[in-house]
Amino acid sequence: MPENELLSNYQLNAVTLPGLGRKQSTKSVRGWLMLMVATLLLSVFALHYNTMLHPMPLRLALAFTALIVLILFRNSKILPLLALLYIAPLALVRRYLMLYFGIIHSDPLLAVIPLFTLYCVMEMAFTHQLKFDNKVAKMRLWLIIIMLVEIFNPKQGGIAVGFAGALFYITPLFWSVVGRKLGTDSIMKTFCWAVVVMGIIGALYGIKQTIIGFTSWEMDWLSKSGTQAFYGVNGTIREFSFFTSTTEYCTFLSLAAMASMVLFLKGQRFAIILLPLFFTAMLYTGERGPVVEMILGIFVILAVQAKNPKVWIPRLVWIGILGLIGLVWVLHHAQSLAINSDQAQNINHQTEGLLNPTNSKKSTANAHGGEIVYGIVHGFKNPLGDGLGASTLAASKFGGTTSQSEADVSNIFLSCGPVGGILFLLLIYNVFKIALITWKDSRSLSSLATLGFGCALLMGWLNGDNYSIMLILWFTIGSTEREYVKLREVLPVKRRLARPA
């Protein structure tokens, strides 16, 4: 094929999504719609009859409806938006169902996203769409193979622990496969705006919990659930908005802030005005890790704005110095944001830890670092690993043996042994590598977002407890992988065309 034709084909493919041009027949669409209507009717029936005695039918009906909708739109531009719309407020839906329709041991609503991503990957495998043409794809494949083997590790307890662990660890990796298929730069722009909008709603809801307080049904749910995850300094209840935990809420805000910075740097200038909202809401939570990692991400994406890669590190150093000076000033004046005494305690907890990271009385940084080291060392001492579910909530839920540490890297060492842990580190390294290469050559939004999200989640790339966070990060990684592979195809052609005759 002539070089000019190859180049034009690449340019065409850059704006045309594979598979989106195929039109479903009217008969097929009608069939899907009839199935969806039937499922919704089943939901209404389950809600009206015997739901108080048997809470499972309603959840099954809702889960089946959501799964069908996602499968129907699996090749559509709006798929990541639908998935985010489902997964982000899912904790709020589950709390409502648990409070009014009973608590169940295993909620089928949590299985929707894992089943959907498995369906997508299996469909791509059977239609020969899976590609292993770069180091990220190869590392991901080998890591998934090791995880599949660790499902059957007897150390973790029953096999149910292993399969439940797969929901936490393998599902996020599947999202990168979906992202590679669908994640064009235009879709990523819309996706980033969706993250920002969801972050705005979440932040306003969380700030409402701060200023006005929790609703009566939220307090009722807290008392009935018996969870301690939402309690902070001196027993105060920390804001969690509509997310699974305060940690996920704060981390989601950090990604929303990162998305707004990426959009700002890519020409959407008014997106920058949202940063104070996200930062203020984060301070109210008392969480410190997401704040530090978000600031690191902002420093990195600002540093790589220079066209010459040789100045990226010096720029990062100077931006870091100036940024830290500004952060210290903000933290010293953060108490003025306190609404009440409880919030004053949370903000004080936040600021003291950030301003004194090496003081063990005011910061838990040393303790967290010690747990990470423990997890890695434990992995080398147990080369076969403790089992995929051992380092997740699945172990305690299904009566298995729990061995968790503070970060996802050390948890992978615990669950999958040193081979799995090293593979995961190599995967992270190669993701950052292709993101930097892609950003240097194409200035794509997805590569800049991968750098920002990757830094903002530096210790939590495979923290499957945070469902919505994993979707955002790994779909973006898949989009960057897509851009990287296409660049590798076209750059040699561009360079040969640019040579003088």
Image: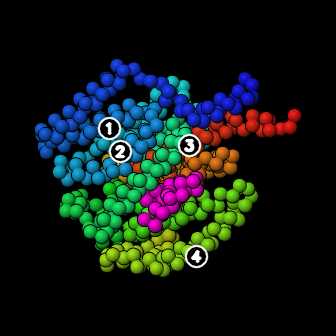
Mark 1 or mark 3, which is nearer to you?
3
* Residue 99 in sight from this viewpoint: yes
**Circle 3 SS class:** helix
> Which image quadrant: the N terminus?
top right
Q: Residue at x 48, y 24 (%)?
A: 22
Cα distance between the residues tagged 3 and 2: 22 Å
Q: Is 442 situated left or right of 129 in this image?
A: right
Mark 3 or mark 4, which is nearer to you?
3
**Circle 1 SS class:** helix
Quadrant of res 131: top right
**Circle 4 SS class:** helix
Give the prevailing secondary structure in the magenta stretch: helix
Which is more N-terminal, label 4 or label 2? 2
* Residue 422 in sight from this viewpoint: no
Q: Reply yes or no: does residue 383 show up in magenta.
A: no
As displayed, is residue 79 above or below residue 469? above
Cα distance between the residues tagged 1 and 4: 47 Å
As displayed, is residue 489 above or below residue 300? above
Marks 3,4: beta carbons within 8 A: no
Which is more N-terminal, label 3 or label 1? 1
Which is more N-terminal, label 2 or label 3? 2
Residue where numbered disc 3 is placed: 185
As displayed, is residue 39 above or below residue 245? above
Residue where numbered disc 2 is placed: 86
Cα distance between the residues tagged 3 and 4: 34 Å
